[in-house]
Image: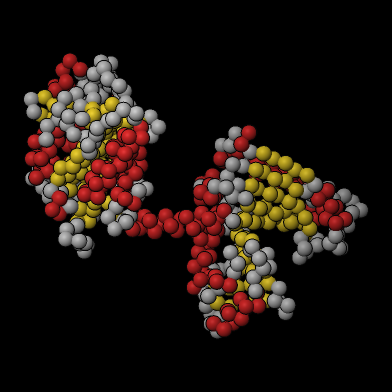
Amino acid sequence: MQGFGLKKYVTIMEEKHAIIIAVEKYQDRKISSVQYAENDANEFAAVIKQHGFNKENITPLISEHATKTRMQSTFKTIFRKLDKDDQLFIFYAGHGFSDANKNYITCHDTVYTDLTATSISLESIFSHVRRLKSQKVIFFIDSCHSGLDIDESMRGMLSEMTDEEFEYFCNESKYHVVFASCNHDESSFSSGSLKHGIWTYHIIEALNGNNKRALERKVYLTTSSLQNYLSREVPLTLKDTFTSKKNQTPRLWGNLSREFILADFKEIFNRRRAESKTTTQLKKASFLGFKFGSIKSLSGFKKGYRAPQYLNDITRNFVRNIGNEEFTDEANQIYSDLQSNFKYKRREISFSQDDGFASILTPDFSVHISIDIDEEDLGQYKITFDVSEIKNPESLMSKEFADTFDNVFDRTSFNFSKSPDIEEIIDTIEDIGNPDKIKVEYLADASNCKIFIDGFSGYIFVDSNGISLIHRRKTTVQNLLEITNKLPSLLTDNRIMGLLPT
């Protein structure tokens, strides 16, 4: 890609692999546990997935799975897979130490009385990396105090881990980089409120794009921008966490004359903005579906009864009474499906029913069900299913929601804050003069209109109350959401969006 400033930046492409190791608990009880190491590793694994690390290329080794044999075998297996342009992240959270100027990371089965023989030297890992086809290897090392009687919030070194090995390793390649949580004579601290090592917490925040100060040009996380961010934020968090002064200086080794981009957030931020708009939009939506049937088929319709000839309160109450059994069955079925699919507890979901109306309130949305006469055919009843009052739009995109409501709805509706000028909408569409692209149908009084747009098999209905996307038939939740998400662009592309109230 094009560089910016005076530096040349390299975007890492091809396959991405990660080995993520966290040794929080040790077999040897003489070695103290490492606070929040497992949480650090799990969150690190989760956040890199949005940066092109596929699940099958992420290898986690957590506590009892992080034995010396398993770790060594994993390194060899993954190293053999790497091609020239592939990228590898290696994350380690656990105890580390130095002996005879060699640095070591500990394993789940490390023995306190025989540390060097039962741990893994970094040089043994570095030597394998030097022989790889891939030169793009980034280490994240949050190596912590081992086995000494210290405060559990301290995550420091058993003894000084020397710089020489890191410098030699990184200087051999333009794209070998090591991030470490602190200087060799300092400690690496954790936070009880964050439930993370403080340094790793900020690594995760940066990789998640949660702090724009970690980015170059607001979209690129580079080796330098990440290090600058860590150097700034870690001391601030230490100051907020502890009453006494703590020193922790994040380290970076690597050839930064041609640093590369660790993460490119352009597409991620665009997707998040789109999802944010969708979330706001869905909170205002209602999803509607109907079930029809002959009034004479209702269980309460007895010999001598006649189907309604008029639409009024008396005939409506008549249908509600004779259709109570069918209506109750439908409402109870929805309640049962919601409980089964979403695993709601009894206290999380409420049910009320009275005179042909039922409401089911959940933590995520509300469901309203009613039975009435079909206004377009007085010989039919109509049961309406309405999901609205949406508090958690993400729930609408879940498998649980689809399992409950697939092929129940045929429309999405949005209410207006004030009535639109429907005549202006009609005139705008007719002035476009392209009925193959967009056309409109309306009544003589222009009280409402139907808009047909190329690419949508249904139509858009607009009246004084709101706007609805109406499909030709009941459809899946996924299809309903896809069309709903496209509604703003459909209206904008056809010069209608600006004519509608917000």
Q: Residue at x 70, y 45 (%)?
A: 359
For this rendering, which residue is in front, 465 or 376? Answer: 465
Q: Give the residue at the far right of this rendering.
A: 304
For this rendering, which residue is in front, 350 or 242? Answer: 242
Residue 50 versus residue 199 in the image, above or below? below
Give coordinates of residue 237: x percent, y percent: 33, 37
37 horizontally vs 480: left or right: left
Residue 268 versus residue 340 in the image, above or below? below
Would you identify the image quadrant in which residue 420 lies? bottom right
Would you identify the image quadrant in which residue 411 lies? bottom right
389 horizontally vs 491: left or right: right
Q: Residue at x 17, y 37 (%)?
A: 76
Give coordinates of residue 94: x percent, y percent: 25, 29
Give coordinates of residue 497: x percent, y percent: 54, 70
The answer to whether one can see residue 436 in this image is yes
204 horizontally vs 75: left or right: right
The quarter in which the C terminus is drawn is bottom right
Q: Residue at x 56, y 81 (%)?
A: 435
Q: Residue at x 59, y 69 (%)?
A: 500
Residue 341 versus residue 270 in the image, above or below? above
For this rendering, which residue is in front, 254 or 314? Answer: 254
26 horizontally vs 341: left or right: left
The answer to whether one can see residue 23 in this image is no
